[in-house]
Image (spheres, rainbow, N blue to C red):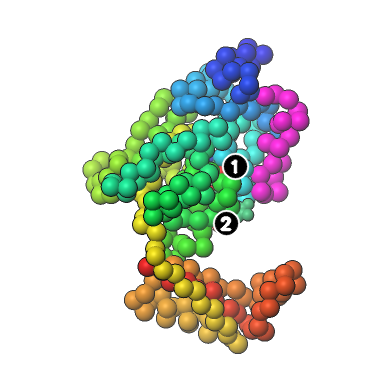
Amino acid sequence: MFAIQKLIEIVGVENFTDQLEELVPYSYDASMNVHRPDAAVWPESIEQVSKIVKLANEFKIPVVPRGAGTSLSGGVIPIRGGIIIDLSRMNRILEVSIENRYARVQAGVVCDDLNRELAKRGFTFPPDPASSTVATLGGNVATNAGGIKGAKYGTTRDYVLGLQVVLPTGEIMHTGSYTMKCVSGYDLAKLFIGAEGTLGVITEVTLKINPLPRHAMTAVATYAKLEDAGKAIFQTMTSGVIPSVMEILDKVTLKSIKENTDIDLPEAEAMILTETDG
Ligand SMILES: Cc1cc2nc3c(=O)[nH]c(=O)nc-3n(C[C@H](O)[C@H](O)[C@H](O)COP(=O)(O)OP(=O)(O)OC[C@H]3O[C@@H](n4cnc5c(N)ncnc54)[C@H](O)[C@@H]3O)c2cc1C
């Protein structure tokens, strides 16, 4: 009871809930796991996140940071109850520096929202998980999200220049830099990438951004034998041109697409979908 009162003091009554109907959605993500938290908060600043985590540490209450809840692995399910820290109200794009090729964002910014903003200036943040219409950049970092363009552009890890993180004690840590080439010191940011929120709550992210490619072309090829598709991928990836997309669809996948859509696909053992850009 005392902890609840304290939580309300930290975030305000409008950013706190322990109501069943609001906690039920927080029992799920995109996986098969289910467990209800005891409370959820929507912090609006790093100071609030720090105080929440300090309080939880003092009372030994489990906390789970949450972005959009699109996790496919149960990462946001509060299996021991406790507090969900929903970062979705920390959703401001803080700075876009085209000259220095970085964007600084709060953790709750949605991936596509950043890309819409960057596109106006001819730039992009390349990692593109298929959940990018709703997934947050904090969630992308915590899961090291990749996407269909991973063949050329890699995963979120390759774009994180720096992080602001609230540690389990509630202390605030800044790590990384704003420069493309930073070689000094321990690379602590990397430790938090893919850690699924187990090491702290990410509140701010500095991301490397790229100029938008001006041209892109796609190609599709079908194969009578799966091995031939494998050989074609190997030959393409070693040809000197790295495709931006290189996806293989096997017979089962092709059948599933045919049965569930009206896309007219040819009969084949395998298909490769590829794109080059520049
Ligand atoms: C339809 C669909 C398509 C997908 N496609 C892809 C894909 O192509 N590639 C891919 O890699 N993934 C994909 N995913 C998985 C998932 O969407 C991504 O991993 C995404 O990055 C998660 O973002 P989120 O904001 O929803 O995070 P959440 O699901 O809310 O959280 C994911 C994990 O990160 C932690 N976390 C979230 N925010 C923070 C924070 N601020 N600080 C610390 N920890 C935090 C959570 O505790 C949890 O462990 C897909 C999911 C769906 C449903």
Does dot 2 land on a helix, a strand or a loop?
loop
Horizontal side of residue 168 vs 267, given as left or right:
left
Number of on-image labels? 2
The residue carrying mark 1 has its beta carbon less than 8 Å from ligand 1: yes
The stretch of residues the image draws in magenta is 17-35
**How far across and down, in percent of the image, does residue 45 sit?**
48, 26
Horizontal side of residue 102 vs 232, given as left or right:
left
In the image, is residue 119 part of the stretch drawn in magenta?
Answer: no
Q: CA distance from mark 2 to mark 1?
A: 13 Å
Q: Quadrant of residue 69?
A: top right
Identity of the amino acid at label 1?
Ala
Q: Residue at x 66, y 79 (%)?
A: 265
Name above or below for residue 132 compared with residue 177. below
Q: Quadrant of residue 240?
A: bottom left
Along the line of sight, which residue is nearer the eye, 183 or 216?
216
Residue that carries the numbered disc 1 in the rendered image:
68
The residue carrying mark 2 has its beta carbon less than 8 Å from ligand 1: yes
Identity of the amino acid at label 2?
Ala
Residue that carries the numbered disc 2 in the rendered image:
130
Q: Crowdedness of circle 1 by 10 Å Cα count: few (<14), some, many (20+)? A: many
Q: Quadrant of residue 56?
A: top right
Q: Is residue 119 visible?
A: yes
Q: As drawn, which residue projects farthest toward the front?
A: 120
Q: Crowdedness of circle 2 by 10 Å Cα count: few (<14), some, many (20+)? A: few
For the C terminus, the image quarter is: bottom left
